[in-house]
Image (spheres, coloured by chain):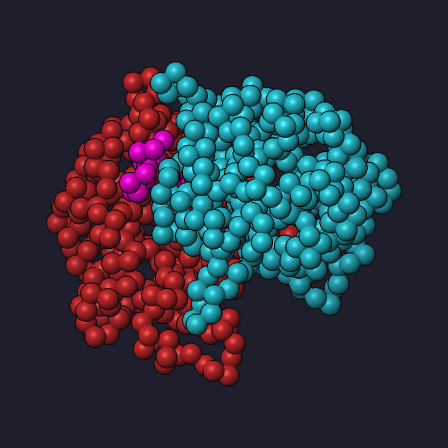
Chain colours: A red, B cyan
Amino acid sequence: MLNFSDRLIEAIKKKNSVLVAGIDTTVENIPDYFIKKYYDNEKNEIENLKYILFEYNRRIIDAIEENIVGVKFQAAFFEQYSYYGIEVLHKLIQYAQNKKLIVIFDGKRNDISSSAKGYSNAYIGETALFDKKIKFFDCDAMTVNPYLGEDGIKPFVEDCERFKKGLFVLVKTSNPSSKDFQDLIVDGKYLFEKVAEKVHEWGASCKGKHGYSDIGAVVGATQPQAARIVRSILPNSFLLIPGIGVQGGKIEDLKYFLDKNKMGIIVNSSRDIIYAYKNHIHSDFEKSSFIASKNLKESINSVIN
Amino acid sequence: MLNFSDRLIEAIKKKNSVLVAGIDTTVENIPDYFIKKYYDNEKNEIENLKYILFEYNRRIIDAIEENIVGVKFQAAFFEQYSYYGIEVLHKLIQYAQNKKLIVIFDGKRNDISSSAKGYSNAYIGETALFDKKIKFFDCDAMTVNPYLGEDGIKPFVEDCERFKKGLFVLVKTSNPSSKDFQDLIVDGKYLFEKVAEKVHEWGASCKGKHGYSDIGAVVGATQPQAARIVRSILPNSFLLIPGIGVQGGKIEDLKYFLDKNKMGIIVNSSRDIIYAYKNHIHSDFEKSSFIASKNLKESINSVIN
């Protein structure tokens, strides 16, 4: 099996796309007509949730798959439906895996080493259960928060090496308040630069045959100036870039995120794809998402190429 | 309903304990004889997991309840069993709530505001589901990571105000690598001081009738020097203190964490309680956990009083 970074590069080439769709659906945002059509009054709301949440997202994935290299699942929006939501998440992850999409679990997990290991087991590694070892989610990559430092990241990095997985460490996030701590100055550098330096260290031993590390960074599309700095510290890492569209990130700024090969980025869009129907692109939500993802892919490619 | 900080203070007085038991059980650490006794070969390993993981933790809670003010559930150790683990977690949370224990969800969640809202909905707030609003976990408090800054914390704080819940923001963690970023110097202060200052701001509007904020901080028992600094910045906040025992934190150092009323702390112990049987305190695991929790409670009280 190839390293994560190699799998990602080959998938990008095959799809001619660095676009990742954020599957962040909440039931309130699913079109009314869809809910009316599929809500089964014979069943309780949990059974309806499980069917409708899966089915809406499955159809979005079917509609957009040719335009995307992968899917990023925002854990929060599934966790808010308790274990029922996680069951849907699990089923959607398997569905995306069967389509050979790159699957990223966006949970921004973090803890001391023993607990970090539990998270890593769940999403990119394996869990011991009686006399078995089970890969419950088996995602390609996940996001983590660096605040606890190296020993909270190492369990994930070790599983990346062992199971050929990837990690994206939060470095400079897309939200306005990312400045509160990430932009504080330490020894003449931004805190996020210090974090990027550590990401470089942590990822040094995880390089694939294309020379890219399997340990990447999250840098928001709203942060092009930070991106130039991070890119200089992480010349051989993938950057996962959320924040285009609703959050204010501009596609033309993606040029500041590219590496010297004009590569090394994947770009997430969530609401502009999964709720594209709200922009009245087309009367059909699947077609709307298809068109939105195609336009996004092409706009991004025009900046990269 | 009382504010979280008031509920906590009243529970501490009633129980004469600031001890919180960390329910962080992995199946590998459950005694062999317990697994042999309850493993049902007629059922698959998932059904056995759900029964055994619940039943072991339930018995621990029964055994120790008189010695503890609350329970802290480490999300990672349940998530590693996928949605089956979360179902057990949900059942254990309800079980602990029925015993009037303070329930803390230790998930160290963090994200941009829209996603943070999803996490808050799940664990301390409510989730919209079709025409209903459901409080899926309804915990008393949860832990969060501050790296994304204010707009990633606000959704939780708003739910604390609305639903009378509490928050513990990671300030200075118990692990050795907490120094990597938390101890970096910004304007002559440690980064964790800057975080504590923000926690003070965020919690200013969430005070209960006893004058304590519902927005507290996590400070590791291994960090007594940091604790003195944090305490000076947060004179009216609860500190959630993990890290005594296996991680090296000393009970006698808890004096540095106390406020001017010799209050304002809750102290977590996980492995020393849930796996007390390993220390051969007693042939019975429940009795072992009872003795360990009683000894811990009394040792801590001797430092506080």
Would residue A130 be seen by someone viewing this image from the given angle? no
Q: Please state which of residues A260 and A170 is positioned toward the viewer in this rendering.
A: A170
**In the rendered view, would you say B197 is above or below B80?**
above
- Screen quadrant of the C terminus of chain B: top right
Q: Quarter of the image holding residue B264? A: top right
Q: Quadrant of residue B38?
A: bottom right
What residue do we see at 52% from left, 38% from top? B213
Image height check: is A156 above or below B174? below
The residues colored magenta run A163-181
Q: Residue at x 69, y 57 (%)?
A: B98
Question: In which quadrant will I find the N terminus of chain B?
Answer: bottom right
Residue A179 lies in the magenta stretch: yes
Q: Is residue B206 among the parts visible in the rendering?
A: yes
Outermost residue, right side? B283
Location of residue A22 in the rendering, given as x and y in whole percent from the top left corner: 33, 55
Furthest residue to the bottom? A42
User: Residue most toward the front?
Assistant: B209
Image location of residue B185, percent across then percent down: 40, 19
Residue at point 37%, 61% (across, down): A25
